[in-house]
Image (cartoon, grey):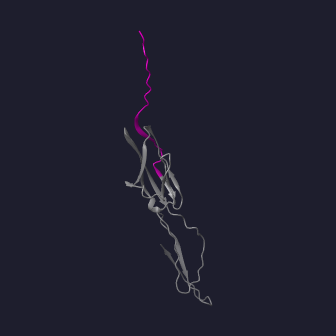
Amino acid sequence: MNILLISLCIPYLGPPRIRKSDNETVTAVSGSDLTLPCVAEGSPKPVVTWKINDKDISYHKEKFTQLESGSLQIKHLLPSDTGLYRCIATNPFGDDFWEIVLFIQGRKCGFSGSLILFITLFCNLCCSLFFITPIFTIMFHKFLPDVLFSASTPLRY
């Protein structure tokens, strides 16, 4: 009597799992670049996609780059990039997702101290701040040639 012994090795097949970070909120500075992690495991290998505020981001190829690992690279952050980012991993056996909230802060003004402007008609002094309440004081002084009169008016924006 001949016995034939056959051994089969069947690989594990199952739904994807995303390695989730403890940090579900990220704050970054406007103008910088950022990579949001999304490492998915599963068999067969899951397909990873990203959404921001439930919208597909694939049409922003210059702004967003999905790395081979599944992580999302965002270039030149703007305050409008603030939102809920969702990494979704899918294979024939199911899906998994991970969400991260991204806040973008505006850059701080690079000026501090006193600034003296000699104005003939008008002057615009601009400082763009996003998601930060700007608090600064502008003082106007009127100087007469013989310095007989001086006045200041503090304004708060």
Q: Which residues are magenta?
A: 1-25
Task: Give 141 or 15, whichever is nearer the viewer.
Answer: 15
- 140 within the magenta span: no
Image coordinates of residue 135 in percent, x first then y, are 50, 69
Q: What is the x, y in percent for residue 37? A: 49, 47
In this rendering, does residue 133 appear at all? yes
Which residue is drawn at the image coordinates 60% and 71% (left, top)?
Answer: 113
> Of 148 and 45, which appears nearest the observer?
45
Of residue 70 and residue 108, the one placed in the foreground of this image is: 70
Relative to 141, say whether 50 is above or below: above
Q: Is residue 112 above or below residue 36?
A: below
| Residue located farthest toward the front when viewing the structure as drawn | 2
Which residue is drawn at the image coordinates 46% and 55% (left, top)? Answer: 102
Query: Dominant secondary structure of the magenta stretch?
Result: loop
Left or right of 150 on screen, residue 83:
left
Q: 82 or 46: which is nearer to us?
A: 46
The spot of residue 136 in percent (x, y) is 52, 71
Q: Name the residue: 58% across, 87% down.
A: 149
> For the N terminus, which image quadrant?
top left
Q: Within the magenta stretch, is there residue 18?
A: yes
Asked if residue 87 is positioned above or below residue 132 in the image, the reply reads above
Q: Residue lying farthest bottom?
A: 146
Whole-percent x, y for residue 74 in the image? 49, 56
